[in-house]
Every structure is written in C-alpha cells, then in structure tokens.
Amino acid sequence: MRHVIDPMDLSVAEVDELLALADDIIKDKSRYAEVCHGKKLATLFFEPSTRTRLSFEAAMMELGGNVLGFSEAASSSAAKGESVGDTVRVVSCYADIIAMRHPKEGAPMMASMKSLVPIINAGDGGHNHPTQTLTDILTIHREKGRLDNLTIGCCGDLMFGRTVHSLIKAMSRYENVKFILISPEELKIPSYIKTEVLKKQNIEYEEVTSLEEAIPKLDILYMTRVQRERFFNEADYVRLKDSYILDKAKLKGASKDLAILHPLPRVNEISTEVDNDPRAKYFDQALNGKYIRMALIMKLLGLSI
C-alpha cells in the first residue's frame, strides 16, 4: 500500500509514468471511463477547497468510480472532538482510497499511519500539496515539452505558500533548473527550503523584490496569492495583500513563450485582463489537475487498462 504525503514520495521515474498516463488519458478519455468501476474515493476536507476537492471527485467519477466524504470539519465528527486518526480509521473501512486536506501540518502523515487504504495529501497547512505539484509539473511539461533547463519565477507569498514549497522540492530533481524568488521581505521563502533543498542540492536561485525586473528572465511565472488564512494579524495581511499584481503592463518585458501559472484561487494578484493572453495557462492548469489526479488514483489502486 502506497501513500502520497510529500511530492518526494514519488521518484522521478514514477512522476514520468504519471505524466505519460495523464497524457494518454487526455488523448482518449473514453478508454478510462470504467477503470475504477466499483471503487470509492473518500474526500476528507477539514479545510475549505473548491478546485482540489472537486477535481478529485471529478477524477474518480470520470474513471467510473464513486465518491463520498465531507467538505469541512464542521460537517464531520471532528466537530464532536473525534481525532483525525479515528476518523481515517473508520472511513478507510468504507472507501478504497482517501484524499485528505487538513489545516495542521503533518495531519495526513499521521492519518496514513492509521489508514487501511492509500492516503493522498490534498494539502496540509503551509507544508505540502503534492497533487498540486503534480498538476504544475504536468502543465509545465505540456507547455514546454521538458522539465529541465528552465528558469522558474515564484511570486507572492513564498513563506506560507505550500504549493511553492512543494514545486521547488519537486523541480529541484531536474537538471539546470533555476529559481527566481519574488516576494516582499516579510514573505520570503522559509530558510529550511533554502538550506535543505536549494543549497543542499546546489540549485541556482536568487531572491528579489521586483517582479518587473525578474519577468524578462523567466520561462515560467508561478503567481500565488497572499493568503489571509495563514496570517495571525489582519493588519499584516491588509498591508501585504496587494504587493504584486500581474497586469498587461508588467508583461511587456516578458518572453513570448512565457507560461503563467497560478494554483488558484486568484484574488487580485493577476488582473483579469491577462486571462486572454496566450501565455496565461492557469485555467489549463486547473483542468490538468483532474487528469493527473486520475493517473495518481489509478497508480495507487494498482489499476490499468
């Protein structure tokens, strides 16, 4: 039985297999329409979500499986004080695989120790979001045709942004990948990412505060929102929330084949005027999330066609 708690739980070879499977699903969805017939996915979302939860549910349904679960802690027995471990142990009696999101870092790892079925971490606090990372990698691969020799700009909330942390970990395994980390001083990338990932693996990176200066150098621009739910102080959130707003003016210096990604939801960090720019790939990215989750569900359940 395999769990996916951290993006590094999958080897580069396994990621390549998932990308190839997702590409095949995209080419001919009908071939996969019954591969999960009779299987059930439980979505245990102790924290609100739209794209991640619905894409997991859509993925299972399009594979011919069924879905059960809850979308917030208040609608589960957690509201009565039940532990995560007990919840997962019980739900694993009813489902074949579980996708779990929780606001506390490490909760999915703890859940995996109690579960009778595979656990997929659908996001734990500011820590990891491995299926978003797989979504990002699939999108980069489909847009660029490669996962090496890239300069990736990560912009916005790099301190609390679990999607950025996961992406840096995963992309650090490919050759000649450089990161430009764009953020206000208060939201810089955590030191453990720099010491345990970037410096440890001799990955080239630079930290800057200007999006305009960085954007001409980029192959990928990964925008993120400043997350109100990660702040303890509302005043700090209000002060920093508009730090970076991508608009047409800022894109004037960008490469014609830049790919703009965003894990969504967007607040105002990407102007809607950018949506029709051919470099805007964030809605394609959201769709890719469904296909890579279909591939991951199949892999963890040991299913093929």
Image: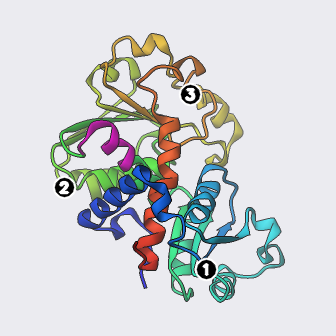
Q: CA distance from mark 2 to mark 3?
A: 31 Å
Judge whether residue 55 is colored magenta: no
Whether residue 4 is visible here, answered yes or no, is: no
Q: Secondary structure at mark 1?
A: loop
Q: CA distance from mark 1 to mark 2?
A: 44 Å
Mark closer to the observer (1, 2)? 1
Q: Amino acid at mark 2?
A: Gln
Compare marks 1 and 3 and give the one earlier in the sequence.
1
Pick the front one: 244 or 262: 262
In the rendered view of the protein, which quadrant contains the N terminus?
Answer: bottom left
Residue under label 3, please give it: 269
Expressed as whole percent of the image width and height from the top left, the position of residue 115 reads 56, 86
In the rendered view of the protein, which quadrant contains the C terminus?
Answer: bottom left
Whether residue 237 is visible here, answered yes or no, is: yes
Which quadrant would residue 13 be assigned to in this image?
bottom left
Q: Amino acid at mark 1?
A: Gly
Compare marks 2 and 3 and give the one earlier in the sequence.
2
Expressed as whole percent of the image width and height from the top left, the position of residue 208 reads 34, 29
**Which residue is at a point 57% across and 21% down the rendered structure image?**
271
Look at the picture and state if 186 lies above or below 3: above
Q: Amino acid at mark 3?
A: Glu
Q: Which mark is residue 280?
A: none
Q: Which residues are magenta?
A: 137-146
Residue under label 1, please give it: 38
Q: CA distance from mark 1 to mark 3?
A: 42 Å
Compare marks 1 and 2 and give the one earlier in the sequence.
1
Residue under label 2, please give it: 201
Asked if the residues shown at circle 1 and circle 2 are in contact, with their CB atoms under 8 angstroms apart, the answer is no
Mark closer to the observer (2, 3)? 3
**Which residue is at a point 81% across and 66% down the rendered structure image?**
74
Q: Residues within 10 Å of mark 3 (few under 14, many from 20)?
A: many
Which quadrant would residue 52 be assigned to in this image?
bottom right
